[in-house]
Amino acid sequence: MDRSNREVSVDVFPYIRVYKDGTFERLAGTQVVPAGLDPQTGVLSKDIVIIPESKVSARLYRPNNITEVDQKLPLVVYFHGGAFCISSVSDPVYHNSINMIVAEANIMAVSVDYRRAPEHPLPAAYEDAWLALRWVASQVQDPQEAWLKDHVDFERVFLAGDSAGANISHHMALRLKESNPTPKLKIVGIAMINPYFWGQYPIGSEAEDPVRKAMVDKWWMYVCPSEKGNDDPLINPFAEGDWSTTLAGLGCEKVLVILSEKDILRDRGRLYYDNLVKSIWKGKAEIMETEAEDHVFHIFNPNCEKAKALIKRLASFINQS
């Protein structure tokens, strides 16, 4: 459809343009690539519908060189980024990234395809992520998916994600502690790459970059039209209540926070790590920061040495005893 002469209502740069007639156009994250064997990494993937009633789907990944039926590997449940409004598990940059993680760490992965705004404003993405975790839990005692039945060690399950997906991982770990499905799902750790947290009032370098701050402000208000704005607990876990007690509810043993020096979200990620260390949570927190790089650089430049180092650190976090 030709939108060149139509009047714009809201420009959610660089993701979505909304027109006054109510239609919208995604400006990024719209490309798709099919599942299958990736010749560069030797990783095999396939798409499945995991919750037919709500149409929640996922892309499953496994090393193609598994020869023994009973070879058990760690499982990573991955939530992709995209500010809750763009991208998908079939986005080439995410598909490529998960292939690289699976190959480097020698793991199984379930990449969750959650619903996006504006068709499905938040908390739809969180609800889909929760349904996906309940599905993974259901495979523990009654495995229906052959890849998981044959090759997953359910004592070594991790949550991971970048940007919005890292945010989802945090909230899923909190929810698991509070209302773990039956059978219980044990989450060893969560890996948060450039986590998407925010707040109404600037901290750190945010005050020095009003242009980018205004841009990030608009993202959240678009996907989550809440009266609490950018201090909604979904985006700002430290806006209200006893955050130390809240963080103590993380249902995992360890957390890895990965930051990028030039990322506008960097100081929020650092605050999350610092508060986690100071909280009454009993787990182990780790942090990594990549110098001179911006938000999710490893997704867009996966073959650079710094991206490879990030993937190796993530693999080490998953595989360390």
Image (cartoon, rainbow, N blue to C red):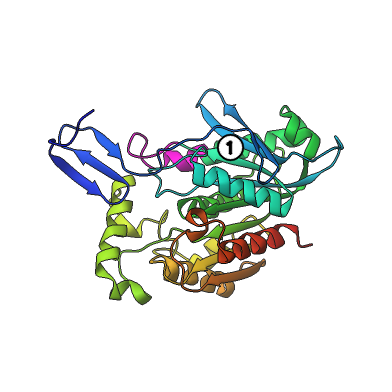
Specify few, some or many for label 1: CA neighbours under 10 Å numbering under 14, 14-19, or 20 or more: many
Q: Residue at x 71, y 29 (%)?
A: 145
Depth check, front residue: 298 or 248: 298
Given the current orientation, which residue lies at the most extreme front position? 39
Range of magenta residues: 115-128
Q: Position of residue 231 (x, y in %)?
A: 34, 60
Most common SS among magenta residues: loop
- Identify the residue under disc 1: 132
Q: Residue at x 34, y 34 (%)?
A: 119
**Residue 187, can we see it?**
no
Q: Amino acid at mark 1?
A: Ala
Is residue 176 shown left or right of residue 9?
right
Is 314 in the magenta? Answer: no
**Total labels drawn:** 1
- Secondary structure category for the residue under label 1: helix
Is residue 263 shown left or right of residue 134?
left
Q: Position of residue 186 (x, y in %)?
A: 71, 49
In the displayed structure, 77 sits above or below 134; it is below
* Quarter of the image with the C terminus in it: bottom right
Residue 121, quarter of picture:
top left
Depth check, front residue: 312 or 192: 312
Q: Position of residue 24 (x, y in %)?
A: 26, 36
**Residue 8, can we see it?**
yes
Is 121 in the magenta? Answer: yes
